[in-house]
Image: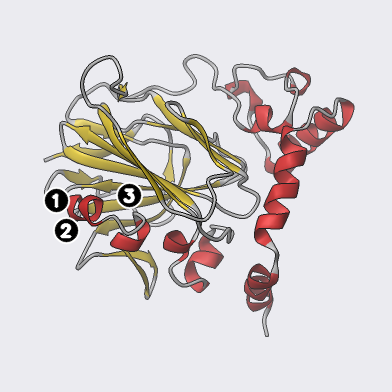
Amino acid sequence: MNFDNLKIAFQYALPKHGVSKLVGYLAKAKLGFFTTWLIKGFIKAYDINMAEAKHSDPKHFKTFNDFFTRELAEGARTIIEDEDKIAHPVDGTVSQLGPIKDGTLVQAKNHYYNLLELVGGDQDIADKFEDGEFATIYLAPSDYHRLHMPVKGTLTDMVYVPGDAFSVNPLTAENVPNLFARNERVVAVFDTELGPMAMILVGATIVRSIETVWAGEITPPRGTSVNRWQYNTEGEDAVVLDKGQEMGRFKLGSTVVCLFAKDKVKFLESLENGSVTRLGEHFADKL
């Protein structure tokens, strides 16, 4: 058995939710000097450019979560203004992108997963993206961990889907079947000028919290049942987010899957598996 196989076997054996709960507790604890020491070690280990952060001094952050979800300094990212161009929603790395064929998405070479399962078994939502386009973007520990809108949108639905907590990285994507449709996740669906668009925030090992700007913390503890919320799209209660506006954040790591409707977008030809993405830069064009 090679080392990669050992790591995958360890993923299956690991009490992932228990580990995530422990790490989550430590990440939100105010531990003074220990928190600052941990943050400094993390910055050094992952070569994080704190000059991009609104607050660059590690001592500013009271908890590790505060540091991990740090705000960018003004001007650190520029959102592409052209309304015919779609902006990258995150800093990260493209894992896969392309067409949704026969209700399936590519997870990795020779690995596929089901659109209906991804959105929590909601046929109405799945139908919106049949024969559409998808992009899966991995956020490494060193990346900025807030997620932003690629286009202006009005929230219509949110689905919480309970699940596992496998790590999400190239190794697990290539070796854990149905990874993104088996991990815990939050599905946010928006009405946009492009038609429906979804951003799916996928949890992972030690990702103890997924938050949105309209609902706050979604995980934990929603339990073991799929939950769906529907939102007013007009009036004072409507959740309308501009292009480039923050829509959510991860407290430790993970992946976002973007879904677009059929014949609505064309990804840049330069984008491929492994391409580095920067929030706000040109991602795709409207058709």
Report crowding for label 2: few under 14, some 14 to 19, many 20 or more residues within 10 A (C-alpha).
some
Q: In this rendering, would 182 be left or right of 282?
A: right
Residue type, numbered disc 3: Leu
Q: In this rendering, would 117 be left or right of 201?
A: left
Q: Is residue 46 above or below residue 8?
A: above
Task: Identify which residue is drawn at 86% across, 25% down.
Answer: 32
Frontmost of labels 2 and 3 is 2
Which of the pair 227/193 is nearer the observer? 227
Real-space Cα separation, disc 2 to disc 3, in angstroms? 20 Å
Q: Is residue 155 above or below residue 113?
A: above
The disc placed on residue 20 is none
Which of the pair 189/72 is nearer the observer? 189
Sequence order check, earlier mark of 1 and 3: 1
Which of the pair 242/3 is nearer the observer? 242
Residue type, numbered disc 1: Lys
Frontmost of labels 1 and 3 is 1
Please say if the residues under marks 2 and 1 sit with CB atoms less than 8 Å apart: yes
Q: Position of residue 246 (x, y in %)?
A: 42, 26
Quadrant location, the N terminus = bottom right
Q: Secondary structure at mark 3?
A: loop
The quarter of the picture where residue 274 lies is bottom left
Sequence order check, earlier mark of 2 and 1: 2
Q: Which residue is mark 2?
A: 131
Count of marks overlaid on the render: 3
Q: In this rendering, would 256 be left or right of 80?
A: right
Real-space Cα separation, disc 1 to disc 3, in angstroms? 19 Å
Q: Position of residue 132 (x, y in %)?
A: 19, 53
Q: Which residue is mark 3?
A: 271
